Amino acid sequence: MKQSALRRVATISAVAAVFVLGVAGPAAAHVTVNPGTATQGGYTKVSFRVPNESDSESTTKLEVNLPVESPIGSVSVKPVPGWTAVAEKSKLATPVKVHESEITEAVTKITWTAAAGSEIKPGTFQEFDVSLGPLPEVDQLIFKALQTYSDGTVVRWIDEPATDGTEPESPAPVLKLAAAGAAPSAAAPAPATEAVAAEEGDTGDSGAAWGIAGLVAGLAGLILGLLAYRKAATGPTPAP
């Protein structure tokens, strides 16, 4: 009887643990571009959001590559306190027109480097704002990004979207472009650009609620299992 009760306790505890981890475990964060939609031929301001995934190291550099095959004529970088931004240009195989002027080179890479004390610390994120336009007449722009940590580790966010709709392991930031006249999805207001606690909107209040519910369910399961074990260990109550 005692062994049966122990097995019951172990089973209940294991199920409760799996349930808690399943609902409360956060998804891995990655570099994204926000908002994720814009209009072909127009201008837009985007923010490259960079969360720090390390528990002990800080992010010291971000490199964002702009697609050479779909050049953007005008690229402006908003200063970020404590960070130096360098925009690199490349010659274009085919010139593009911006404000009726033909340009033969365009920005193809932006590198942000942190000064000492301004790194993205563990548990925080930072946003880097860029003005882009006119946007090319393509369905999407893929910005392959490299994130460097203080220990020299480089995380390559370069995987292009999968054809089956599943998210790749290290997805590159993607800006979807709608044809002129087709309104893109409404964009949420951009948060402040200073580094803040990394409780990103990806999880949200609903995620926290599910996490709490999972913990409560797991605790309840453990208590029920312990009560069952105690009852089995002490045996049935003698009849009066």
Image (cartoon, rainbow, N blue to C red):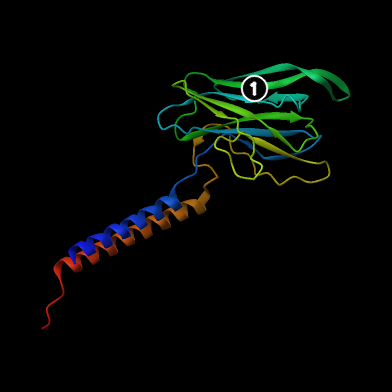
Quadrant position of the C terminus in the picture: bottom left
The structure residue drawn at horizontal position 24% and vertical position 66%, both measured from the top left corner, is: 228
Residue 98 appears at what percent x and percent y? 84, 25
Q: Nearer the viewer, residue 97 or 171?
A: 171
Q: Nearer the viewer, residue 195 or 145?
A: 145
The structure residue drawn at horizontal position 59% and vertical position 38%, both measured from the top left corner, is: 191
Residue 87 lies in quadrant = top right
* Residue wearing tag 1: 110
- Residue 39 horizontal side relative to residue 207, left or right: right
- Residue 169 horizontal side relative to residue 33, left or right: left
Q: Amino acid at mark 1?
A: Ile
- Residue 100 horizontal side relative to residue 106, left or right: right
The structure residue drawn at horizontal position 20% and vertical position 62%, both measured from the top left corner, is: 3
Disc 1 residue crowd, few under 14, some 14–19, many 20+, Cα 10 Å: some
The structure residue drawn at horizontal position 28% and vertical position 57%, both measured from the top left corner, is: 10
Location of residue 87 with respect to 210 vertically, above or below: above
